[in-house]
């Protein structure tokens, strides 16, 4: 049974995440501060960490980077991270912190459950929600010229 650590200082966000993945037979642990993650992970490594980008004094990006630095130094095994982003522009932060996936708020239970499954399965999940559309040149507007 996969063990998931959900980190957010918002009770509502933690409840949303739990309700989206509870039917998938997972153990869910909760933390409210980013600074609590590394000690908790060293004590009992989860299969996945779900990090809210905005967490008190040590946010999701700093927490994820701390996990990656410990991993790079050989003091911690690899633990996949799924980041919960507040807006599309935050994708840059998730990429820079080496998160395996991200979901853009508002949280959709189906997207969130899919993201958790994919990242737990060793893959990645890059939420395309709110991604700007690319418009190809040479379409009908070009014909009017």
Image: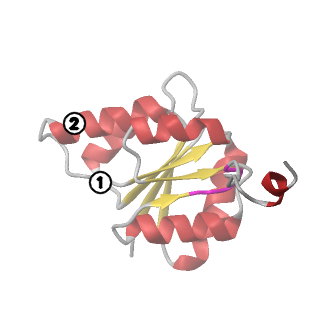
Dominant secondary structure of the residues highlighted in magenta in the image: loop
Q: Is residue 113 visible?
A: yes
The one nearer the camera, 7 or 119, is 119
Mark 1 closeness class: few <14, some 14–19, many ≥20 residues within 10 Å: some
**Which mark identifies residue 132?**
none
Instruction: Give the label, 2 or 1, closer to the camera.
Output: 2
Instruction: State the residue lying farthest toward the right.
Output: 144
Residue 36's spot in the image, x, y percent?
41, 35
Name the image quarter holding residue 22.
bottom right
Residue 16's spot in the image, x, y percent?
69, 57
Is residue 26 located in the magenta-colored stretch of the structure?
A: no
The residue tagged with tag 1: helix, strand or loop?
loop
Q: Decide if residue 81 is on the left or right side of residue 74.
A: right
Residue 124's spot in the image, x, y percent?
42, 61
The one nearer the camera, 113 or 10, is 113
Q: Is residue 35 visible?
A: no
Q: Earlier in the sequence, mark 2 or mark 1?
A: 1
Looking at the rendered structure, the number of numbered marks drawn on it comes to 2
Vertical placement of residue 64 versus 109, above or below: above
Contact between marks 2 and 1 (CB within 8 A): the answer is no
Name the image quarter holding residue 110.
bottom right
Residue indicated by mark 2: 70
Q: Residue drawn at (24%, 52%), measured in percent from left and top?
A: 78
The quadrant in which the N terminus is found is: bottom left
Q: Residue drawn at (29%, 54%), measured in percent from left and top?
A: 45
Mark 2 closeness class: few <14, some 14–19, many ≥20 residues within 10 Å: some
Q: Residue drawn at (79%, 52%), measured in percent from left and top?
A: 142
Q: Decide if residue 132 is on the left or right side of residue 124.
A: right
Residue numbers of the magenta segment: 127-131
Q: What's the CA distance linking mark 2 and mark 1?
A: 13 Å
Residue indicated by mark 1: 45
């Amino acid at each position: 049974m996969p063990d998931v650590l959900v980190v957010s200082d918002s009770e509502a966000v933690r409840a949303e995440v739990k309700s989206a993945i509870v039917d998938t037979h997972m153990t869910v642990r909760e933390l409210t501060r980013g600074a609590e993650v590394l000690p908790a992970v060293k004590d009992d490594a989860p299969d996945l960490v779900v990090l809210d980008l905005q967490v008190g004094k040590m946010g999701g990006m700093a927490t994820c980077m701390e996990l990656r630095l410990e991993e790079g130094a050989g003091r911690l095994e690899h633990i996949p991270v799924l980041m919960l982003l507040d807006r599309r522009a935050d994708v840059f932060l998730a990429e820079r912190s080496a998160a395996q996936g991200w979901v853009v708020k508002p949280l959709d239970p189906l997207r969130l459950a899919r993201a958790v499954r994919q990242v737990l399965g060793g893959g990645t999940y890059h939420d395309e929600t709110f991604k700007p559309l690319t418009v190809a040149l040479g379409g009908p507007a070009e014909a009017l010229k």
